[in-house]
Image (spheres, rainbow, N blue to C red):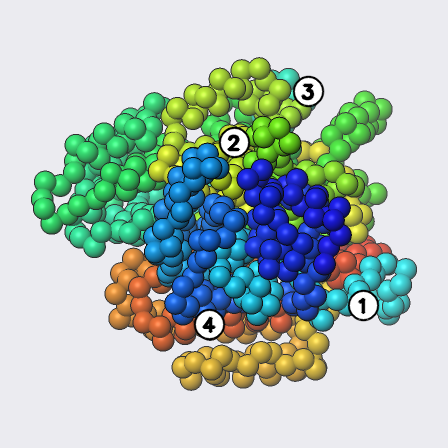
Amino acid sequence: MLDEKQVEKIKQYLPLYFRQYVKNDDDSMARVYPLLSLLCKDAVLLDKVRDSFNFTVPVQLSESESLAKAAELTDKWLESKVCTDPTTFFIYRLPVVLGEFPIHTRAINQAIRKFNSYVEKYHKDPEEKKPDLDPAEIDKAFREILIAIKEHGQTCDSASLWQLLNLMSGWLPSSKEYVMEFPYLFYPTYKCAKPVAEVKEVKEVKASKLPERVKPTVIESKEPAPTVSAKTFERNSNYNFTRAGRLAPETYTLLLNAFGMKIGGHFDGLAKQPPQFIPIEILHEIIHRQLSHQMMIPQSVFFDIWIEDTLIALGLQMSDGLVNPFLSDPISFLNPNKIKEMLEKTYPDTEEFTVSDEDKNRISEYLSGLLLSFQFNPGQALGIGANHDGTVNLSNDSGSYPFKMSESETHWGERFKQISLHRQGPSEALMDVMWNGLKFELGTIFSHPEYMRTLKPSEYPTVLRNAIIDNLVAELFPLPAYHDNVKYEKFQKQHVVRQNENGDTVIDSFYVPNAKGIFFDKDGEKKQTPMHRRAGTLDVQPFPRKTASCDDVRNSSGNNPHVPLEIQYAQSMYKTVRGHIVYDPIHPDQFLPDAFYGQVFLSENGDYGIYIGVMPKHYDRIFKQDSELCASFVIRMLQSSRIMEYCPTFRENYEQIKTLFLPDSKNTPPELPPIKVSRHIKDLHAKFVEALADPARKYNQCQQVFYSLFRNCIYNLYEVFSTSTDEHYKTQFIQLMTSHDSFYPMTRANADRLIRELTVNRPVSDSATALQHYDATIEYLRKLIIYFYPTPSNEVAEKIKAEADAYIKPLLKSPGIRQYFADQKKISTP
């Protein structure tokens, strides 16, 4: 039981009409708590209400376990003869459910809107004239929500789904009974007890506490050093050619840009692929796969013909089964409205094919985004400090001085790109432009004229240390953007409508813990996470900045008085608005536009999508490498990558260090999943076990066997789906497996990327047995990655730092290392 002060406090959070019916007993509180949990910002009060029921605190579940438990509860409610009790005094609306794929959340939210319409109609009338709710209508609408959850709930966000189920429980005839059986209704994930394995205290490992190791023995390589190219860089930005006379798959360029209002300009690296024709089948596969997350694709040949005709009319050029990567005309003023007009003009005139007006809107919005990629050929910016909103990767040669790596330096360029993409995030977070710029400028003035062009002997130890750390981190650790920093708790900002004592409506907002929220707590202050993943996509991107120091970014920052007009213009061109959902218990929800901090995006058709906050985790403060500016970072990446390609002695000692990070030989690899696998995969698994148990094992040999097993398990998926009815899945799978970048480089980051690709492209229309085989294979591949690569932690970072520090002096005495630095002076510049 609660005391009267607490009961009075509870009433203040409820609508005026509900307050008179609140009683201080379990039955009343079981009906009040669901709505209170959404409207109340007093976490202590919620805890006291929850604790008054004397529930056993449930154990925290994973995302999949939580969704499975929700399905179990849904089935339980559907078995009841009567789901709702319309005689309850707490007649409130239900909140929308959110998820990554609109095609699934739409069905649930449509059922919720129908249910809410009865509640809204009920509250329109004055208190003394309120009509009785029709029990049959309410129960039917309630069941329709449950049926939609049963069919589509497994693809929704678990926190959002349980919030909906929690509020639905307040409508049940015996609310308390179900809560006793399913305490997760009252206990959100952040209030559940953590599993025992996660409760153990994780202690920070400091360098001084690491065990002392024997002085490392340097291996002197017998392999001759590669011949230094007579022309390492060329003064142009054209694409390279292979020895066969074809355009190279990728060209690597260093760029010196003159940026307005940026003293000293900017130095960067760029990896760019030549434009390529796209097979029409691949284009259709992409369109089907991405649109299938938003709508049901008509199973008709007319659909593909219709899309092709529309794209051609909009300027896409197709010939002999290939699509030109560029549009025939610029589409600066093309927007979803104009695309829809074209869809109407090219619509097939046949009764066999029908597409609703709502789906035409969805297709027009999708094609608008798709056609943007046919306007330019983006590259990958490899530097730090300037690539805001595509400043570098979407730029042309105007105002830049490019130095292209020659064709003979392809291997160096590939490693340069690999480690740059991995190390740029942490380095940008710790960059110090003012101090480093001043240091280099003063060094040039008061030192030798060649100060900025020549690597001095005093810098050799730093080059070696950086090369060991940069290469180890790039190969053994996941990309920081895909490795969430659990140190920071994430939150969502909840917006609700409340009534004050005078009956006036106010919008209240407060923060609630949520694993996918876009806010985090830093020293008691809530800030937006630096990066996000948009629903239904794989890419992690930085959020737009409201304030910025760069002149190019300031143009679109929140401090620019013209920004409101720019936002209005953008919203008139596109039908998606970023903002917040404002829950109202008795009237329709509101939408609060917020271009910089909105947590969801709302389409014109009413679909919601979510932004998933990402807090990148890195360990650079442990490594204690020098802070960088744009130019010094690119030079460091060039040095760290070149020494791996041009110094056999360094490479062999690096492999010796890397071997220390192999799994403990006493730990056996995970067993193959209980599914049908080929004899070849069984043999590879046996070789993997044998290689890791070998006392004389080396990292490269073990990695070759690991990737062979990993790759063949993925190949085996195609055999399972060779008779699949999902032709688009097969096309996509073949493209993925034949891509140059699929299995290169052999790193933790690339293995993780493959898992993400396979997860998002899971077949959508196949037998349950085949899908179980697919899921079991993906789960096994995840276990393989976790087993083979070291778990990212402060302890592993300390070990990397210790090994790098221990090898510097012995390596400097090596003839092979000394010869490398002497040969480096032969590099020519244009």
Of residue 584 and residue 420, the one placed in the foreground of this image is 584
Question: In the displayed image of the protein, which residue is found farthest to the front?
Answer: 128
Disc 2 + disc 3, Cβ < 8 Å = no
Residue in the image at 22% along x and 51% along y:
298
Disc 1 + disc 2, Cβ < 8 Å = no
**SS for dot 3:** loop
Task: Say left or right for 66 vs 719.
Answer: right
Q: Nearer the viewer, mark 4 or mark 3?
A: 4
Of the two numbered discs 4 and 2 on the same chain, state the one appearing first in sequence: 2
Disc 4 + disc 3, Cβ < 8 Å = no
Q: CA distance from mark 4 to mark 3?
A: 53 Å
Badge 1 amino acid? Thr
Residue in the image at 25% along x and 45% along y:
322
Query: Which numbered tag is attached to residue 777?
Result: 4
Quarter holding residue 507: top right
From the image, which quarter does the N terminus lie in? Answer: bottom right
* Category of crowding for the residue at label 2, using alpha-carbon neighbours closer than 10 angstroms: few (below 14), some (14–19), many (at least 20): some
Residue in the image at 65% along x and 58% along y:
25
Query: Which numbered tag is attached to residue 217?
Result: 1
Residue hosting label 3: 263
Q: Position of residue 252 (x, y in %)?
A: 52, 41
Badge 2 amino acid? Leu
Residue hosting label 2: 592
Badge 3 amino acid? Ile
Residue 830 shows up from this direction: no
Q: CA distance from mark 1 to mark 2?
A: 64 Å
Of the two numbered discs 4 and 3 on the same chain, state the one appearing first in sequence: 3
Q: CA distance from mark 3 to mark 1?
A: 46 Å
Quarter holding residue 374: top left
